[in-house]
Image: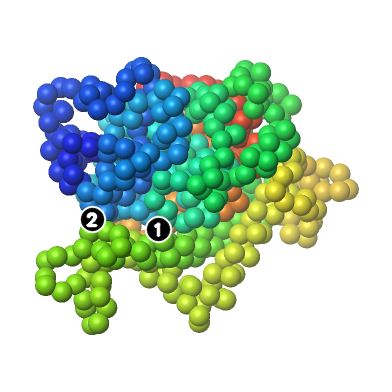
Amino acid sequence: MSTYVRHSQFRAAHRVISIQWRACIAQRRSLHQVTTESTSPPGENNRLAVKDNISATGFPTTCASSILSGNNIPFDATIVRQLREGGASVTGKCGMDEFGMGTHSTTSAFETIHNVCGLEKYSAGGSSGGSAVAVRRGEAELALGTDTGGSVRMPAAYTGTVGFKPSYGMLSRWGVVPYANSLDTVGLLAKTVGPIGAAIVGQRLHMKHDHNDPTSLPLTARERCTTERRGYGSWNPIQEGAIKGLTFGIPVEYNVDELDSRIRRGWLTAAHKIEELGGRVIPVSLPSTKNALSAYYVIAPAEAASNLSKYDGIRYGQRNEEQASDSFEGILYAKTRDTGFGSEVKRRILLGSYTLSSEAIDNYFIQAQKVRRLVRRDFDRVFKLSNPLEDQQPFDLSEMEDTVQLENKFGPAQVDFLLCPTAPTTPPLLEDVMKQTPLDSYMNDVFTVPASLAGLPAISIPMDIPVDATKEEERLLNFGGLQLIGQYWDDARLLSVADVLSPHVLQQKLF
């Protein structure tokens, strides 16, 4: 059984994970019953699970890392405070990949997150795997995660839940331990789209600027962006989410060789459902997509190396006290960082430090930032709505795939939303995950990274996929993740459309 929720009664994170959880099971007490003594009870339908890199008073915030074992932040993150003010009750902290670096929630210093509901041998996705599992098990109605390159959407696809990454700068990151500042976004997970839409639109989180967070969009910009968009007046998906008359684009570059045949067929079936509902589905071209993953794994480690430099056991983090001296070959805190960080974190620190070095920064980091601009430009060209933060640019027809037809002499048709898989495969066995090379693991983010680089809103909803009844694994893994991507600050309409589309693309009952 996955041990992904940690409670505040214990300071050492490994004791929290093992002793407290097993005690709860032995006493046959639910997660909510365990925590009501230490949290206000506004109602059982407002339980909130929080990823372990987001601060919540009364709970340790360890980022699943030994170097922060027992760390307690004495204030709520802004997003936690806002949801608590809206009536949510924090029930626990959720396990994750160490500092958010991973795809399957297997890099934690304390635990490996397992999938649930008969899928315990399979990956729950990462890095917000614990948040997705808490929702899937029914131990929280809403869970907070962080999405840097797909860390909310990937677990949602692997657990059959809904995972939403809002537009960059919409939700405050104050109180969130940073991984990559220009990519990190607080995301939400739930069983259905409804609780997420109620939080973003119903509680008007989209209009709440946080002066503590320099990446939080200013109030004047929020007002301007909101007036240019539909759906922010109230959470009313029936009115705002009608499929009829909308145009959905299928990126031709997303039809990669690594895409599982069942996921591909589920993707096409979802497209047919949209057409039956009165929507239009057309191919679109995003030429820079092929370079997006490479750019992401240059930019994210570079920012991570900078952010994690403060964990030295002197200013931040647990100091290595096994020996009289923490120095090694003249470096004062070498042993603290060696024992405090896991292998994946150290790998990304080394990669990031190299790409920021004087000999490599021009060939790697600067080039990756240029690719990022091209990725954002590609998205802006295919959407009907303009990006309120960018100047509109025409599409260069010489860069367009031959399979994309021209709408008129000005270029190809533009779309309201993009439709693609969330993950290229169904959840892999954890046994196979442990045998993967880092490059194999990174490839799982191929469909989620582009939206993160561009700062666009994206949501993963579960979809039906074909099943061969004679194969036990296919009967177990009978769902996939369908991703919808919208233009910047079109979050409200994206959520409404996802809410209306969900019951049509997933007709089986997962919960």
**Can you see residue 473?**
no
- Does 219 appear above or below 372? above
Q: Which residue lies under the disc numbered 1?
A: 440
**Can you see residue 47?**
yes
Looking at this view, is 84 or 450 the one in front? 84
Q: Residue at x 26, y 54 (%)?
A: 68
Tell me residue 219's x, y (percent).
63, 40
Tell me residue 138's x, y (percent).
33, 24
Looking at this view, is 445 or 350 the one in front? 350
Q: How far apart, in angstroms, are the residues tagged by discs 2 and 1?
A: 26 Å
Element under disc 1: helix
- Does 330 appear above or below 259? below
Tell me the amino acid under the disc marked 1.
Answer: Asp
Q: Residue at x 39, y 22 (%)?
A: 46
Residue 70 appears left or right of 476: left
Q: Quadrant of residue 191?
A: top left
Quadrant of the rendering where the N terminus is positioned:
top left
Q: Residue at x 25, y 28 (%)?
A: 38
Indicate how the structure is coloured in the image. rainbow
Tell me residue 270's x, y (percent).
57, 31
Q: Which residue lies under the disc numbered 2?
A: 66
Tell me the amino acid under the disc marked 2.
Answer: Ser
Looking at this view, is 340 or 135 the one in front? 340
Q: Quadrant of residue 209?
A: top right
Q: How many marks?
A: 2
